[in-house]
Amino acid sequence: MSRTMLITGGSRGIGAATATLAAERGYQVAINYRSDSEAAERVVSEIEQAGGRAIAVQADMAVEADIVRLFDTVDRELGRLDVLVNNAGIIDQVARVDEMSFERVDRMMRVNVTGPFMCAREAVKRMSTKHGGQGGSIINISSAASHRGGSGEYVDYAASKGAIDTFTEGLAKEVAAEGIRVNAIRPGVVRTDIHASGGNPDKPDNSSKGIPMGRAGEAREIAGGILWLASDEASFTTGARLDIDGGV
Ligand code: NAP
């Protein structure tokens, strides 16, 4: 029986690379997205053409009912959930804290923190041996920004990822004896569309000088870490925060 992985924000960037690599390794994949159904369907078709199984499910991480529906859909269409990748995340335009609106910070926290919390709640209800499940793995996508602070650029984003680091530590301990491993990955700058969405499309090229390896990362290089954390090779790893950032 192939294992099932749900990837939030799996239609583009790091999530899409993770979906493709997971399918290559034999997972059935649920690809969540918020608005770009064409991008999600493209990832599904690529996986199907290569002989894999994938579904695309629309759900907004800022809406609890959407998250509940997402997990119900995965139950119905793919069966038992083995791995949740809490990957969906947003940035916003470059701004100082004294320029940020309540609405901006509230949205950042809903999508980047509350959404992953609610997804983890749904996953634990299904995976925990305490609830009759058979265990599983949760991987939260944090950021190098969580320990660098994002000053002058996006402190709200950095703080949301700091919350993800602490969430990972706490949840890992809470469910460690229930068959669930919980880990985080903290990517450095990775070449995806997220930078354009923050009005900074050239960030991967412009950041190269500050990265010891002298270049930005590629989405597939983050996906490799996610697949390792999901695998049995990481069977004694929980509560870890794995930095994949070219040495920053
Ligand atoms: P991306 O290319 O912008 O892709 C974002 C994905 O998340 C898309 O699939 C998007 O779907 C989805 N998404 C956005 N808002 C959503 C919502 N409210 N509900 C559900 N899905 C939503 O981003 P990325 O660069 O791959 O980033 C993925 C994760 O890595 C994020 O958590 C990000 O913070 C983290 N990260 C990225 C970098 C980097 O340099 N790229 C560095 C460190 C950490 P739609 O297109 O349908 O909206």
Image (cartoon, rainbow, N blue to C red):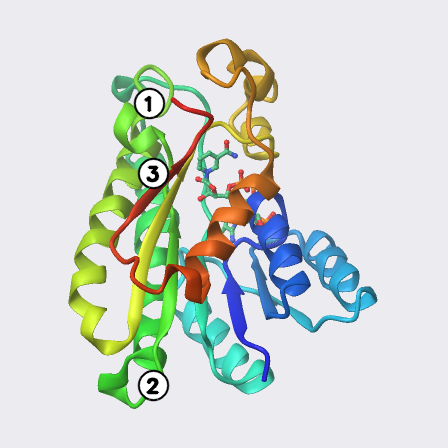
Q: Quadrant of residue 171?
A: bottom left
Q: Nearer the viewer, residue 2 or 73?
A: 2
Tell me the tag on residue 174: none
Real-space Cα separation, disc 3 to disc 1, in angstroms: 19 Å
User: Amino acid type of disc 2?
Assistant: Gly
**Of callouts 2 and 3, the N-terminal one:** 3
Label 2 or label 3, whichever lies nearer to me, is 2
| Residue farthest toward the right in the current orientation of the protein | 49
Determine the secondary structure under disc 3: helix
Q: Is residue 134 visible?
A: yes
Q: Which residue is mark 2?
A: 133
Q: Is residue 33 left or right of residue 99?
A: right
User: Amino acid type of disc 1?
Assistant: Gly
Quadrant showing the N terminus: bottom right
Decide: marks 1, 2 in contact (CB < 8 A)? Answer: no
Disc 3 within 8 angstroms of ligand 1 (CB): no
Label 3 or label 1, whichever lies nearer to me, is 1
Label 1 or label 2, whichever lies nearer to me, is 2
User: Amino acid type of disc 3?
Assistant: Glu
Q: Nearer the viewer, residue 150 or 46?
A: 46
Real-space Cα separation, disc 1 to disc 2, in angstroms: 39 Å
75 over 60 or under it: above or below: below
Query: Which residue is painted at 30% across and 55% down in the image?
Result: 114
Q: Which residue is mark 1?
A: 150
Q: Nearer the viewer, residue 35 or 232?
A: 232
Q: Which residue is mark 3?
A: 103
Decide: marks 2, 3 in contact (CB < 8 A)? Answer: no
Q: Is residue 176 left or right of residue 83?
A: left
